[in-house]
Structures are given as structure tokens and as C-alpha cells.
Image (cartoon, helix red, strand yellow):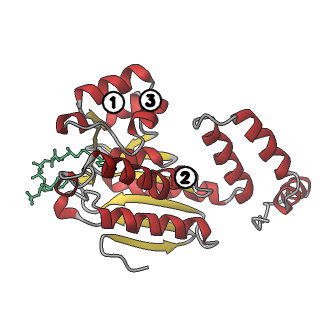
Amino acid sequence: MAYQNLLSEVKENILYVTINREKALNALNKETLSELADVIAYAEQSEDVSGVIITGAGEKAFVAGADIKEFSNYSGKQGEELARHGHETVFNAIENSSKLFIAAVNGFALGGGLELAMSCHIRIAAEHAKLGLPEVTLGLIPGYGGTQRLTQLVGKGKAIEMITTANMVTAAVAEQIGLVNYVVPQAELIGKAEEILNAVKQRAPLAVAAAIKAVIASLNGDNGYATEIEEFGKCFETADFKEGVSAFSEKRKPLFSGR
Ligand code: DAK
């Protein structure tokens, strides 16, 4: 897949996506968002992809927000429409994906950049990363799910503090408040993400997808318990369930087919 603003490649069933606008600190312009939508859709339907790592080019920024130069003239209606479209094609598409997405936060994750990281299932930050939602400094509020996902991750008090002060937090603080899962040296960032995805790769793919769906249902106002019950039942119908149980009885490693 050739893109203008992204680098993407699949290696050993992991799709690596690098937002590649280093001079603009990887800010998300319309074209980048559209390319992200495309690569996310590809990840979802490709049997070659079991998980995705999203990072930013260089060592300074993951993504320093939506591209400020681009959105300065939007009307209220345009803002609302673009927010809805972005939610559907990028941010919710990541969160609702059956593949595990990890954000490898290699520097500033601000505004839309932190929203992108928060839509991923897991976040790992480099030690020098700084994270924040500075939209109110521009007279805006977060428009790609930031008010909701930050609250889910860190709770109401911290979320309101971060959004209304616009202050950034360090990677260490982000880990303390539950905004990122791990903080590692920059050189170990991708390796840590690969370690998690390589562990998940050994597990039954349909069960992994069902688990993600049930957890996410708890966050979306859906009945998470009902989703869990339904997905749990479906697992019994899979060849992977039969293989998992047989492998346990036969004291061997399971060979899952994702069926
Ligand atoms: N957009 C465009 N360009 C950006 C950018 C951004 N968000 N962030 C940085 N750049 C560019 C800078 O303009 C500069 O370009 P040149 O001047 O060299 O051409 C280059 O990247 C390097 O940045 P700095 O020179 O500023 O670098 P420093 O080390 O001095 O500072 C910084 C790093 C990250 C602290 C600083 O760049 C900064 O404060 N950046 C802006 C952070 C920010 O406010 N981000 C936007 C948050 S608001 C929407 C939905 C969502 C949103 C918008 C619309 N719709 C549905 C319509 C979301 C909005 C946001 O994300």
C-alpha cells in the first residue's frame, strides 16, 4: 500500500503504520486521516494482519494534533460533519476493530494525536513523550472522542483537569493515571508493542476479537453483559475452541485456524 503521508508494511502478521509528516510533527490533515481510514479498513479485512502498531515518524512527535492550518476556517456545520466522519472511519473504526491496535507514542501526543492513541486498545509511551488535549487553547474542545475516551481511561476528575487546563502530562504521569499501559525507553518502544502482539498472536483469533468486542461494549452505552454472553456462546461453535481444548488434553500447543 503506497500512501503520501503514511508508511505501512506487514511483517509477520503485524501491520506497522507510521504517520509520516515529521516536519509538521505528524499533524493529522484530511489526507492523512483518509489514508488512515483506508489502512484501518485493510487491517480489518486482511487475514495476514493479526495486530497493528501505529506510531509517528521521528523521535519528537507521535502526532501533535489535527492540522491547525487546515481547520482554521471550518464552519460549525463542517466541524460537526467532519467530526462524525472521522469518528466513523478512523477513531471508532480502530476501537471497534477485531484486530488489536497498539499506539507506540514516540513523542508529543496532543489533541487529535492523543485521541488517535486513545482509540487504540493499548498505549505504550517513550519516556520523553508528552500527552495532552490542548483544544481549549484554540477555542475548541476535543472532537475525535477525546472527552469520552480520556474520561473512560483516567476518570472524570483527571479528564476535566487535563481538558480544561490544556496542560500536558509526562509519560510517567500518564502511566500513573492509567492513560498509557507502559513507559519504556524510545529504543524499546516498538519491541514492547511487538512483544504484546506476538503473545496475542498465539491465542485464538476469534476469541481475541470477541474479547475486544465485549470490553468495548462496556464503554459504548451498549449492554456489555449481553454482548459478553452472546460472544461467549459463539466461541463454543468455533473450530478454535475445539482445537484449544484438544491441545490442552493432548499436552501440546494449539494450532488455531481462526475458524
Ligand atoms: N498542526 C499543524 N502544524 C503543526 C502542528 C499542528 N497541530 N503542530 C506542530 N506543527 C508544525 C509547526 O507549525 C512547525 O512548522 P513550521 O513552523 O516549522 O513550518 C513544526 O510543526 C514544528 O513545530 P514547532 O516549531 O512548534 O515545535 P516546538 O518544538 O517549538 O513545539 C509543540 C512543539 C508540539 C509544543 C508545538 O508544535 C505545538 O504546540 N503544536 C500544536 C499543538 C496543538 O495545539 N495541537 C492541536 C490541538 S487541537 C476536528 C476534530 C479534531 C480536531 C480538530 C478538528 N474536526 C472534526 C474538524 C482536533 C484539534 C486538535 O488536535
Viewer-proximal residue, 21 or 251? Answer: 21
Q: Horizontally, is 216 left or right of 164 in the view?
A: right
Packing grade of label 3 (10 A; few <14, some 14-19, many >=20) is some
Viewer-proximal residue, 247 or 229? Answer: 229
Q: Position of residue 15 (x, y in %)?
A: 49, 67
Give the SS element for disc 3.
helix
Question: Quick check: can you spot residue 124?
Answer: no
CA gap, disc 1 and disc 2: 22 Å
Asked if the residue at label 2 sits under 8 Å from ligand 1, the reply is no
| Amino acid under disc 2 | Ile
Select label 2 or label 3 by which is in front: 3
CA gap, disc 3 and disc 1: 16 Å
Asked if the residue at label 3 sits under 8 Å from ligand 1, the reply is no
Q: Position of residue 38 (x, y in %)?
A: 46, 69
Q: Horizontally, is 240 left or right of 12 in the view?
A: right
Q: Residue at x 77, y 68 (%)?
A: 257
> In the rendered image, which residue does mark 3 sit on?
151
Q: Earlier in the sequence, mark 1 or mark 2?
A: 1
Q: Is residue 248 above or below residue 138?
A: below
Q: Residue at x 39, y 46 (%)?
A: 144
> In the rendered image, which residue does mark 2 sit on?
196
Q: Are marks 3 and 1 in contact (CB under 8 Å)?
A: no
> In the rendered image, which residue does mark 1 sit on?
173
Q: Which mark is residue 65?
A: none
Q: Are marks 1 and 2 in contact (CB under 8 Å)?
A: no
Packing grade of label 2 (10 A; few <14, some 14-19, many >=20) is some
Question: Quick check: can you spot residue 126?
Answer: yes
CA gap, disc 2 and disc 3: 25 Å
Packing grade of label 1 (10 A; few <14, some 14-19, many >=20) is some
| Amino acid under disc 1 | Val
Select label 3 or label 1 by which is in front: 3
